Amino acid sequence: MARPADTIAALATPAGTSALAVVRVSGPDTARLAAAVGGATPLPRAVRRGRYRDRAGAAVDEVLFTFFAGPRSYTGEDALEISSHGSPFIAQRILADLFARGCRPAEPGEFTQRAFLNGRMDLSQAEAVMDVISARGDRALAAAQQLLAGALGRHLGPLTDALLAALARIEAYIDFPDEDLPPEDRGLVRAAIRALQADTQRLLATRRYGELLRDGVKTVIIGEPNVGKSSLLNRLVGHERALVSAEPGTTRDFIEERIIVGPHCLRLIDTAGLNAAPQALEQQGIAKTRERLAEADLRLLVLEAARPTLPRTLAWPDDFSPANTLVVLNKADLAPAAKPPPALADFPFVAVSALTGAGLPALTAAISDQADRLRPADEAEGIFINARHADALSRAAAGLADAQRQLEDGGPVELLASDLRGALAAFGEIAGRIDNERMLDRLFAEFCIGK
Amino acid sequence: MDFNRTPFDVIVCGAGHAGAEAALAAARMGASTLLLTGNIDTIAQMSCNPAIGGQAKGQMVREIDALGGEMAINTDVTGIQFRLLNESKGPAVQSPRAQCDKKAYQFRLKHTLELQPHLQIFQATVTGLIFSGGAVIGCETNLDLKVYGRTVIVTTGTFLRGLMHIGQNKNEGGRLGDFSSKTLSASFLDIGIELNRLKTGTPPRLLGRSLDFSKMREQKGDASPTLFAFHDTRDSEDLFHVEHTGEQRLGWAPGTRQISCWMTHTTDQTAAIVRSNLSKSAMYSGEISGVGPRYCPSIEDKFVRFADKPRHLLFLEPEGLSTNEYYVNGLSTSLPFDVQVDMVHSVPGLENCVLLRPAYAVEYDFAPPTQLYPSLESKKAENLFFAGQINGTSGYEEAAAQGLLAGVNAVQKGRGEPPLIIARHEAYMGVLVDDLVTKGTTEPYRMFTSRAEHRLLFNHASAEIRLRDHAARHGLISRSRLMRVDDKIQRINHWLAHLESHRDHGVLLGDQVRRGGEPPAFPEAFLKESIEVRQQVLYRVNYKGYIDREERQIERLGHIEKVRIPTGLDFMAVRGLRRESALKLAAFRPYTLGQASRISGINPTDISLLQILIEAGRGGAAADEGAGPN
């Protein structure tokens, strides 16, 4: 079934400086390319050391070539892995050369997509693999592995059964009006729908946390100019990344860094300072800051320990709550016994010195605690759903809500049933089609039908 | 000896509810048609209860009428009680039901068949099929006459190796007093058609004058009956055919001769009698291998499976105006006759009753319908069609619906034209055939409204509108009736648009309707429209949100209905397909992606995978109408 595909290439390791960088190539032209750049015909599944030579014949780096002959490869096609030294420059030169030789840059996830298309894995596995690949942090990995193991399907089982039972109670009175059935009890149906709504919402609530796990906790560092936000970011990241300056207002673009804190991945975002008398350019920066703030999962509100006053420009205190904000009293080396101002008395706080590193372990522990609080109180076996599941579950929830409304309004029973059937079909999109036969099984088990 | 020199276009074997509609449909399309029946006196006999319609079935009978079938009109003019079921539950699930005068029903249909041009009836029992090169070319009969035809429709009902049980007593036959078709099964097996056993049952028949109706509750018909046929678009001569032929066919003005049914119930004593005799029941002593229907359990089953239910309702239904025989609905059993007598006498009002016929269970062969194309043609033998109980269904209405489709499709096949295939979103008839050929059945299949995912669109009065295009394309209704249907559709559409675009006191008329309560100030012209037009308009306005949603769904899923799965695709070899899905697909062998998507446990991932495979492998094999080779 393999359709003719072009040959794709991409960096398989994260961009940036590292010990090694791996460039991956997959597609029908791979074997020829491997011979061209490595100077020898590759043997399947054997690692060969050699020089990567570009089209001009210049040696780019000393590398390891690993060739996989299709279909015994990840994608099911011929594939090549080139391990070079981990300079971004080397990897970029190799990629540039491969593109010049006719490869196409791979789309995100395209290697896995090819694996799926070539029958190397099913779609749900492919989805889970994408989750595993992009899992940032232990929790995310555990959640992805749960999905791989079909935990969501198992979790949906009881929900589906409850919905089938409720539906059977409705359908019996529609399809067997002449039968000697017990008086119709809508109270049971109402209670069942309510319970189902709660369960569905609980699953849906795992979506946001699921996203946090996959994409990282969006953490915005906010504070007045010159309180040391960028220094704090740098200290957290562990290396100089943001441009640090003593002049207020140097950070106009947002600096984003990912770090692992405890079991969590954090996306640290440094923002423009909240300037009291902003220039036009600063004004723009502040508008963007507000946007960032609105999207943030967690806020690090940085105050100067010596003068821990609320930022004067902080005209939107509603955005901050003890649940989503951690107060960081920076420059604590200058004022060791500092406390947050009375207005922030309820907020968790940590005193640190970005300059000396003092208090950093306490800060990362506090961040980790705050991130833990984002986890839904009542999580279902560590299941965190993805966007496709969320879409189906949202439709199920909407169907249940409509059904609830029909029940309250005393609407026609055929419409009530239609809403419930919609919800059932949505569950089925995740767990596999739920045949009407299963509803009938419930119906005939529960009611004596047959005049 | 050969019966005919020129082959018939269509031979129909069996003249029950499936066979009668099949023969009429084929002949009305102008095909030379032969209807073979083992006994002309039992044409269109109601072997079980003397009633037509009910939940989902009632809608289906109206669909049969919309496609030019005979069941609806035949019921209307021989009906002796009409009731609209679910009147309080909303227009989509309301269903007409009628008790019929059993003999009048039969005789009128027999007469109709006799008068039908292009149709010949002949009494002979089909004993085998004649094949040539994998295709059927005719039948052998018990009279040593060979009959040849281009196509053959088999409607054997319960007669295929039919075996009746009353306690330990066994009689061969498909119905008490009738024969069993014993050799035909071999013909099917020879050509590779798999057969299986099903079971059904029927209650005793009682003598009316031995019943005490004062101990029972009366169930009257509706004062204004809901009929099955579309009389508002029908030609008047359609009803009695008097103008054309001068004949006087049996029947009366619909709803003019209504009589009552009676309700009573079982007692503790009934339960005790049944329980203490369970071991004598054919079903409970292991005599019967066939699977019975869950929705129509025997009285033994009811007392065993629902032990906490103290009593079960029974309905006494009159079998006709010119007979004193009553059918006891709810008392199907395979207990021995002496136990049946004790059991019946334990019921209030039946203490002194006289049994005219015993209850019995009957086992019969059916051919699992997954062996059929959606045209109802066999995948195993070309030009061979199946309809009715041989496909594992139960019910006169289900049989008639299949008969009509098989009749049309046999003619189409003979002419090299595409078959009539009704989609699931168009009618119960579409759901019926799709369920049968996609999923098959393990019990006698009966239609329920819940089987239709688009039930809200299946309002009984809309059948003519839903099936208009099919009827027109195959010429199943007269030109004048089609014009009246089109006129009706046009009026409905006009008023739908009007109510959704005109306001009264600033509020859209449609919104006023949907709000309920006092009806809005309708235009004078709307109030002058027929009740049929007004009802359709109001139903659609009231349900607009839901109907729109259904239609969007149909559109969204429509494309996969048209994607053919290549015959012979090895599902097990589709890499990446979950093993459990592959096993199911391999077992059901769906014909289109739409069919595949309806198999239990199949999820959108499986469908995406198949779709990618088919479209990549075949460059997008668009479906022909999805009906098998032509």
Image: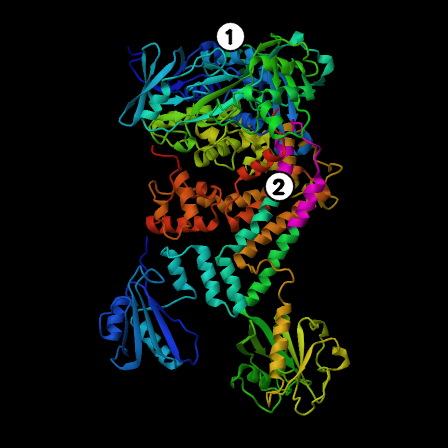
The dot on residue A244 is none
- Report the residue at 50% width, 22% height from top: B69
Looking at the picture, which amino acid does disc 2 mark?
Ala
Determine the chain carrying the residue at label 2.
Answer: A
For the C terminus of chain B, the image quarter is top left
Magenta span? A168-196
Q: Is residue B475 visible?
A: no
Tell me the subunit letter for badge 1.
B
Circles 2 and 1 in contact, beta carbons < 8 Å: no
Describe the element under mark 2 as helix, strand or loop. Answer: helix
Task: Give coordinates of residue A162: x percent, y percent.
Answer: 62, 45
- Numbered tag placed on residue A165 in the rendering: 2
Q: Is residue A170 magenta?
A: yes
Among the 4 quarters of the image, the one containing residue A95? bottom left
Whether labels 2 and 1 belong to a single chain: the reply is no
Amino acid found under the numbered disc labelled 1: Gly
State whether residue A10 appears in this view: yes
Which residue is identified by label 1? B246
